[in-house]
């Protein structure tokens, strides 16, 4: 099935699509579209040459399949502020970013189930929202995982924040409003269903400390991190910027 890249981008950005800051960032980032094949599951096609004024429809396609113009991503990375992380012991996930997995888009389903439904195939639900089973082609390890909801099995597939919330807090999110931080924590652009143990191993590491073992996914991983950092006005460290730039240098235009 072919889906427009513009529609795919809207799905990844989510409810903040019409936000002026988001629109400006997307205009800077998204150049001429190209066909992108990710994990052999879906193809996003059609050139996306305009961003604003296209309505509010979305398509059910995982955000990891977006194709960005690499030169524009490099320019955006170059525009991010570079400074040391604001280290401290005051990070509190729930206090600063709200309880996990809220229903910020008002569709009646929590964010975790929204992302599972987006990223898994062969999805089965209990009712409207709760994903009880499905199959994940894990972008971090390039291996398949059969997901089964249950106390002992749900953790096999976890929802990763590509820019970890602790990293976000230490790189400028403390200066955002509570509402904006809740948006960041539930933003589909910053969320991905992945292998649970790999997510735990990544923890709150930035790109200078951790990249997916699946080298074929590293470009999309860094591209989305750059977009998230730009969207929410977050900075990068020297080592983080250098690692991101190194990955982008290896990406195809």
Image (cartoon, grey):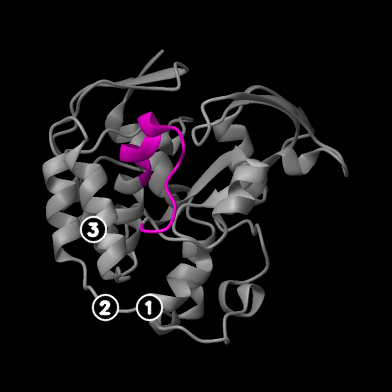
Residue 85 is marked as: 1
SS for callout 1: loop
Q: Give the alpha-carbon distance from disc 3 to disc 1, as whole Å.
A: 15 Å
Relative image position of residue 83 (x, y in whole percent): 26, 78
Q: Which residues are magenta?
A: 208-221
Whether residue 230 is visible, yes or no, is no
- The residue wearing badge 3 is 242
Q: Looking at the image, is mark 3 or mark 2 earlier in the sequence?
A: 2
Q: Give the alpha-carbon distance from disc 1 to disc 2, as whole Å.
A: 6 Å
**Which residue is found at the position 47% from the left and 63% from the top?**
184
Question: Residue 134 lies in what quarter of the image?
Answer: top right
Label 3 CA crowd tier, 10 Å (few <14, some 14–19, many 20+)? some
Question: Residue 40 lies in what quarter of the image?
Answer: top left
Relative image position of residue 210 (x, y in whole percent): 44, 52
- The residue wearing badge 2 is 83
Of residues 13 and 143, the one nearer the viewer is: 143
């Amino acid at each position: 099935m072919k889906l427009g890249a513009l529609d795919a981008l809207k799905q990844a950005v989510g409810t903040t699509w019409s936000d002026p800051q988001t629109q400006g960032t997307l205009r800077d980032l998204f150049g001429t579209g190209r066909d992108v094949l990710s994990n052999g599951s879906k193809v996003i096609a059609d050139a996306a040459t305009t961003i604003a004024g296209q309505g509010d429809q979305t398509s059910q396609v995982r955000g990891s399949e977006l194709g960005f113009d690499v030169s524009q991503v490099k320019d955006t990375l170059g525009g991010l502020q570079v400074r040391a992380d604001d280290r401290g012991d005051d990070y509190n996930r729930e206090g600063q970013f709200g309880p996990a997995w809220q229903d910020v888009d008002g569709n009646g389903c929590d964010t975790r189930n929204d992302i599972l439904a987006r990223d898994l195939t062969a999805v089965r639900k209990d009712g409207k929202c709760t994903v009880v089973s499905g199959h994940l082609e894990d972008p971090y390890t390039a291996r398949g995982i059969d997901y089964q909801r249950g106390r002992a099995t749900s953790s096999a597939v976890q929802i990763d924040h590509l820019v970890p919330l602790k990293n976000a807090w230490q790189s400028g999110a403390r200066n955002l409003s509570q509402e904006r931080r809740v948006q960041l924590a539930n933003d589909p652009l910053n969320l991905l269903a992945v292998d649970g143990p790999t997510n735990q191993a990544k923890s709150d590491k930035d790109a200078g400390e951790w990249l997916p073992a699946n080298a074929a996914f590293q470009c999309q991983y860094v591209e989305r991190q750059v977009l998230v950092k730009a969207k929410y006005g977050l900075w990068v460290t020297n080592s983080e910027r250098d690692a991101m730039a190194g990955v982008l240098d290896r990406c195809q235009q």
